[in-house]
């Protein structure tokens, strides 16, 4: 799931950080109560920003939420970095281009299916150069482990999945988690379901799904998307589709004449 970040979006009220964390603890506790012993909890968050202009200070929500998860005896398996190329441009600090996913398990006997989420290897023809397997292919024919840094475009205005929700995450992001951390017919629950991306992804992969939200207009959109997921008509970006590289011959990608006087840009 991806909870509100306490930044004053249209679907939330900005609260004192202490109160925000207390509310998060209540939701996390409810999730732990229904979590199977072999199950996982994934919490996708960004930063809570205090102040304006030069006075801005970023509070990484994954770091302040971590002690809450640990208080319930959960074990952190990965702190996944979700990176993307587009977002707000900052003037007084580096522009934020990543968020994090905290993946916790309830026990050491948890579901982890690597094969369905493998990605193409950089050197599939690489062979062992010494030892008993010298000369044999050293990789896996299904691909490599995707690692813990995932470059997946975020859902902006021209994204095929875009709805009216201002902070929608892509189906491909949650699909990777669902395929790796659940089995078919398992139950996937999203307490902050928004427009239903998690539930749609679960249905596509033959899992059961449940969720909740307090915004009626988002639930209406979610119902429509879930129905399309059932019928196979929901448009979405494939999980491992390569990130788009612009055509440098187009006018928007080519160096403008006004900038060519800066020689370092031409190199």
Image (cartoon, grey):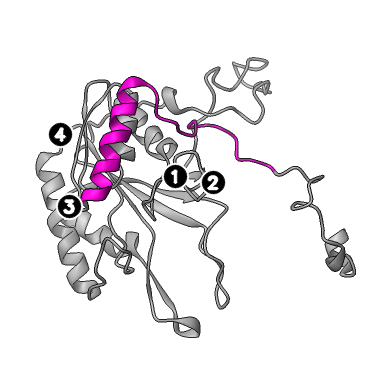
Ranked by sequence position, the earlier of labels 4 and 2 is: 4
Q: Do residues under tags 1 and 2 come within 8 Å of each other at their CB atoms?
A: yes
Q: Do residues under tags 3 and 1 come within 8 Å of each other at their CB atoms?
A: no
Element under disc 2? loop
At 36% across and 52% down in the image, what residue appears? Answer: 165
Say whether residue 43 is left or right of residue 250.
left
Ranked by sequence position, the earlier of labels 1 and 4 is: 4
Foreground residue, 124 or 84?
84
- Residue 77 drawn in magenta: no
The residue pinned by badge 3 equals: 28
Of labels 3 and 1, the one closer to you: 1
Instruction: Quadrant for the C terminus, please.
Output: bottom right
The residue pinned by badge 2 equals: 158
Foreground residue, 217 or 194?
217
Foreground residue, 166 or 84?
166
- Residue 220 drawn in magenta: yes
């Amino acid at each position: 799931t991806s909870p509100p970040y306490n930044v004053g979006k249209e679907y939330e009220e900005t609260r004192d950080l202490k109160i925000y964390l207390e509310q998060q603890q209540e939701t996390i506790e409810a999730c732990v109560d229904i979590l199977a012993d072999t199950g996982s909890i994934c919490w996708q968050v960004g930063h809570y920003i205090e102040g304006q202009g030069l006075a801005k200070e970023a509070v990484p929500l994954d770091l302040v939420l971590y002690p809450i998860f640990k208080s319930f005896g959960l074990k952190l398996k990965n702190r996944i970095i979700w990176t993307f190329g587009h977002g707000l441009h900052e003037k007084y600090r580096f522009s934020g281009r990543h968020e994090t996913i905290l993946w916790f398990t309830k026990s050491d006997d948890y579901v982890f299916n690597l094969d369905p989420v493998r990605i193409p290897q950089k050197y599939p023809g690489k062979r062992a150069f010494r030892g008993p397997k010298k000369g044999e292919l050293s990789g896996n024919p299904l691909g490599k482990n995707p690692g813990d840094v995932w470059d997946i475009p975020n859902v902006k205005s021209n994204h095929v999945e875009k709805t009216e929700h201002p902070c929608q995450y892509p189906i491909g992001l949650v699909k990777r988690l669902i395929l790796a951390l659940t089995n078919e017919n398992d139950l996937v629950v999203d307490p902050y379901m928004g427009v239903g991306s998690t539930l749609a992804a679960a249905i596509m992969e033959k899992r059961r799904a449940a969720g909740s939200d307090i915004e009626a207009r988002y639930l209406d959109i979610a119902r429509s998307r879930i129905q399309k997921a059932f019928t196979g008509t929901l448009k979405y970006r494939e999980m491992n589709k390569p990130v788009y590289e612009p055509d440098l011959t187009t006018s928007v990608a080519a160096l403008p004449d006004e900038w060519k006087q800066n020689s370092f840009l031409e190199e």
